[in-house]
C-alpha cells in the first residue's frame, strides 16, 4: 500500500497536479488525489518524510527535469510540478523538524539591485526547496548591503544571485567584493545565474559556480 502511495505521488509530481482539482497533463487523473492529498496520506500511514521526499517528490522532479531538458515539457509544465513539490515540502517541514532530519543546507537567494526579474529566481527557489534545502528568498532589486547583512546575521551555507540584464549583472561582482570586505566571503558558497551571466563571468567575479537553471543548481550543490 505504501508503495502505491509513493508511486502515485511521484506520478502526480510529474503531472503537475498539486490538488485533486487539478487536471494535470493526462486528464484521466482529474478528481483523483493530487500531491498535497497524497503527501498527507503518506504521513497518515507513517511513511517517513525521507521516503516521501526521495522516492516521491525528488524522483518525480527528476523525471520533470528530463522532460524539460528534452523539450517535452515547457516552463508552465515545469512550474506546475515545482509548485506542487514546494507546497508538499511545507506540509513536511514540521515533520522533518520533529524527526530531527537535517536539511541539506540553508540557501539564500536574491535578484540583485536594479533588477526586478524574478521568474528564474522563483523557479530555482522552489526546486531547491523540493530538493531538501532550507530556502530564504530575499526578493528582487535587493541592495548589496542587505545581502551582506543577511549573510552576516543568518549565516546561510549558500547564496544564489540572479540577474537577467547585462546592466545589472555587474552588481554580482559588487556583492562578492562586499562579502570579502565584510570578512564573510569564505563563509558562504556563491552561485550565480540568469540570462546575462555565464560560467566565464562566474570565474571572473570569483563566484563558486554558474547555474544554467534550477535543475542545474540542484546538481551543482550536490557536487560541493
Image: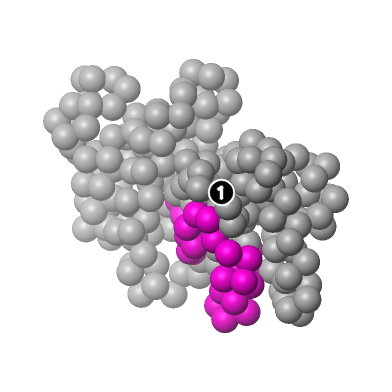
Question: What residue appears at the point 75 percent right and 57 percent down from the top-left corner?
Answer: 173
In the rendered view, does 109 fall on the left or right side of 207? left
Q: Quadrant of the C terminus?
A: bottom right
Q: Nearer the viewer, residue 89 or 159?
A: 159
Dot 1 crowding, Cα within 10 Å, few <14, some 14–19, many 20+ = some
Q: Position of residue 12 (x, y in %)?
A: 32, 34
Highlighted magenta segment, given as a residue range = 129-158
**Render colour scheme:** one colour
Locate residue 88 relative to residue 142 in the image: left or right: left
**Image quadrant where residue 189 sits:** bottom right
Q: Is residue 6 above or below residue 66?
A: below
Quadrant location, the N terminus = top left
Q: SS for tag 1?
A: loop
The residue at which mark 1 appears reads as 115
Is residue 133 in sight in this rendering? no
Can the viewer see residue 154? yes
**Residue 18 colored magenta?**
no
Snapshot quadrant of residue 96: bottom left
Q: Nearer the viewer, residue 210 or 223?
A: 210
Looking at the image, residue 5 sits to the left or right of residue 206; the answer is left
What residue do we see at 49% from left, 62% from top?
Answer: 138
Residue 145 occupies which quadrant of the picture?
bottom right
Amino acid at each position: 500500500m505504501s508503495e502505491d502511495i509513493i508511486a502515485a505521488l511521484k506520478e502526480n509530481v510529474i503531472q503537475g497536479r498539486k490538488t485533486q482539482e487539478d487536471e494535470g497533463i493526462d486528464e484521466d487523473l482529474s478528481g483523483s488525489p493530487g500531491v498535497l492529498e497524497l503527501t498527507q496520506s503518506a504521513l497518515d500511514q507513517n511513511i517517513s518524510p525521507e521516503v516521501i521526499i526521495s522516492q516521491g517528490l525528488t524522483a518525480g522532479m527528476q523525471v520533470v527535469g528530463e522532460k524539460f531538458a528534452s523539450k517535452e515539457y515547457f516552463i508552465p509544465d515545469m512550474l506546475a510540478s515545482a509548485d506542487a513539490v514546494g507546497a508538499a515540502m511545507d506540509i513536511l517541514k514540521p515533520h522533518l523538524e520533529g524527526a530531527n532530519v537535517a536539511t541539506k543546507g540553508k540557501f539564500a537567494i536574491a535578484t540583485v539591485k536594479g533588477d526586478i526579474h524574478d521568474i528564474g529566481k522563483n523557479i530555482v527557489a522552489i526546486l531547491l526547496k523540493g530538493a531538501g534545502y532550507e530556502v530564504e528568498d530575499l526578493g528582487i532589486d535587493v541592495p548589496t548591503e542587505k545581502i551582506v547583512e543577511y549573510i552576516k546575521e543568518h549565516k546561510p551555507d549558500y547564496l544564489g544571485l540572479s540577474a537577467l540584464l547585462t546592466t545589472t549583472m555587474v552588481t554580482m561582482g559588487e556583492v562578492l567584493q562586499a562579502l570579502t570586505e565584510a570578512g564573510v566571503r569564505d563563509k558562504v558558497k556563491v552561485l550565480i545565474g540568469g540570462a546575462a551571466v555565464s560560467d566565464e563571468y562566474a570565474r571572473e567575479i570569483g563566484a563558486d559556480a554558474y547555474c544554467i537553471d534550477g535543475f542545474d543548481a540542484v546538481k551543482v550543490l550536490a557536487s560541493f
